[in-house]
Amino acid sequence: MPNASDRPRRVTIDRDGPIVVEGPVEVVLEDGSVVTSQRFAAAICTCRRSRTYPWCDTSHRRRTSRARGEPQQPCPRSDGAPE
Ligand code: FES
């Protein structure tokens, strides 16, 4: 999918969370299948805990909250969109 814009596509890395890519975006999975997000930005899971992999469903927050001793956060989104 070509980038129609003249400016570079922005990819934002969150050390403890997803990689957020300006959309629309296609993601090629390990098995060669392709999933697409038409949203203006897509959050791609890097922790592999998402139930909607490859899209981030905020499950990474439970891991980082526990590690820090903070209360768990709910997981309100399941569509790969950043908050
Ligand atoms: S980065 Fe894996 S659920 Fe958010």
Image: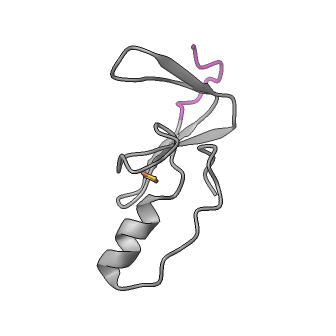
Q: Quadrant of the N terminus?
A: top right
19 lies left or right of 48: right
> What colouring method underlies this structural image?
one colour
Q: Which residues are magenta?
A: 1-9
Image position, residue 53 (x, y; %)? 47, 39
- Tell me, yes or no, whether the highlighted magenta stretch contains residue 2: yes
Q: Residue at x 64, y 54 (%)?
A: 77
Q: Which residue of the protein is positioned furthest toward the front in this rendering? A: 51
Magenta segment main secondary structure: loop
Q: Residue at x 59, y 20 (%)?
A: 3
Q: Quadrant of the C terminus?
A: bottom right
38 or 5: nearer the eye?
38
Image position, residue 12 (x, y; %)? 47, 48
Image position, residue 13 (x, y; %)? 41, 50
49 lies left or right of 82: left
Q: Residue at x 53, y 30 (%)?
A: 8
Q: Residue at x 54, y 32 (%)?
A: 9
Judge whether 64 appears above or below 60 on screen.
below
16 or 79: nearer the eye?
79
Judge whether 22 appears above or below 76 on screen.
above
Q: Which residue of the protein is positioned furthest toward the right in this rendering? A: 39
Image position, residue 51 (x, y; %)? 49, 46
Residue 6 sits in quarter? top right
Residue 73 sits in quarter? bottom right
- Tell me, yes or no, whether the highlighted magenta stretch contains residue 67: no
